[in-house]
């Protein structure tokens, strides 16, 4: 596991106040930043370079909280190595246009839109192009989740605390959502598919 000295050398933690040639004092702000760095590395699996981007977004001054949150979301979203299908790119652009966001001209300019286009490209490559039809209902359902996320982070007092809550909540929340989604599938499939026989294999 990387040490505090390593994080200091990488510029992820501010230097403490020297109390002797070999010792330094670290206050609550240092401990909070250390917890955040460890969450980004250990929970989020981010590279040191990506962690540096997140911290830069947090520390940027003269930005609205909304813009800071957007910058953080970009930093913690990792572009996929999947080759983007031109039709999948158009699907993403059409999706944005349907919802009044016309700035998505080049999906590769944003890590988030790149992730979406890569997912649709992967679906198309395995014969499930129609998964794009889930985008609109997904968006409506996820707005409820986004509202819950923002209500959670808004409970924190300072802007830095809000940003930290969004970072950690997003990274851990992604894992929680996967688990709860699977539980929901189990419940709903019992209602929808419970009496439907499985298709037999063709001879």
Image: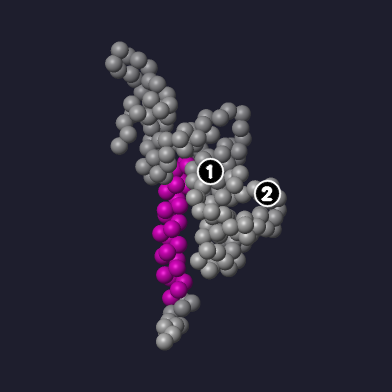
Q: Which residue has dot 2 on it?
A: 105
Q: Residue at x 38, y 20 (%)?
A: 16
Q: Residue 88: x percent and y percent?
A: 60, 59
Q: In the visual, does 123 lie left or right of 107?
A: left
Above or below: residue 145 compared with residue 190 = above
Q: Is residue 174 on the magenta stretch?
A: yes
- Local SS, label 2: loop
Q: Residue at x 54, y 43 (%)?
A: 74
Q: Quadrant of the N terminus?
A: top left
Do we see residue 153 in this rendering? no
Q: In the visual, does 154 lie left or right of 6?
A: right
Q: CA distance from mark 1 to mark 2?
A: 19 Å
Magenta range is 165-190
Q: Residue 148: x percent and y percent?
A: 52, 51
Q: Quadrant of the C terminus?
A: bottom left
Q: Which mark is residue 120?
A: none
- Local SS, label 1: helix
Q: Which mark is residue 73?
A: 1
Q: In the visual, does 27 lie left or right of 82?
A: left
Q: Residues within 10 Å of mark 1 (few under 14, many from 20)?
A: some
Q: Is residue 183 on the magenta stretch?
A: yes
Q: In the visual, does 31 lie left or right of 95?
A: left
Please name whichever residue, 103 or 63, is drawn nearer the observer in this view of the structure. Answer: 103
Q: Residues within 10 Å of mark 2 (few under 14, many from 20)?
A: some
Instruction: Say which quarter of the image contains residue 118.
Output: bottom right
Do we see residue 125 in this rendering? yes
* Number of disc labels: 2
Say whether marks 1 and 2 touch (CB < 8 Å).
no
Q: Residue 26: x percent and y percent?
A: 36, 23
Above or below: residue 147 compared with residue 153 = below
């Amino acid at each position: 596991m990387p040490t505090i000295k390593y994080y200091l050398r990488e510029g992820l933690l501010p230097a403490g106040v020297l109390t002797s040639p070999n010792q330094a004092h670290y206050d609550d702000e240092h401990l909070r930043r250390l917890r955040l760095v460890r969450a980004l590395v250990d929970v989020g699996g981010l590279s040191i370079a990506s962690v540096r981007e997140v911290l830069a977004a947090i520390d940027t001054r003269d930005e609205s909280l909304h813009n800071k949150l957007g910058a953080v979301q970009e930093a913690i979203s990792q572009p996929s190595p999947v080759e983007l299908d031109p039709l999948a790119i158009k699907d993403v652009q059409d999706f944005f246009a349907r919802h009044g966001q016309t700035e998505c001209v080049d999906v590769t300019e944003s890590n988030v839109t790149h992730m979406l286009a890569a997912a649709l490209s992967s679906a198309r490559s395995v014969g499930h192009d129609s998964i794009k039809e889930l985008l609109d209902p997904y968006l409506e359902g996820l707005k409820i989740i986004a509202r819950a996320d923002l209500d959670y982070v808004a409970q924190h007092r300072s802007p830095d605390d809000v940003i930290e809550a969004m970072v950690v909540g997003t990274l851990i929340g992604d894992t929680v959502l996967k688990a709860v989604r699977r539980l929901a599938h189990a419940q709903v499939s019992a209602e929808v598919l419970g009496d439907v026989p499985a298709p037999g294999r063709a001879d």
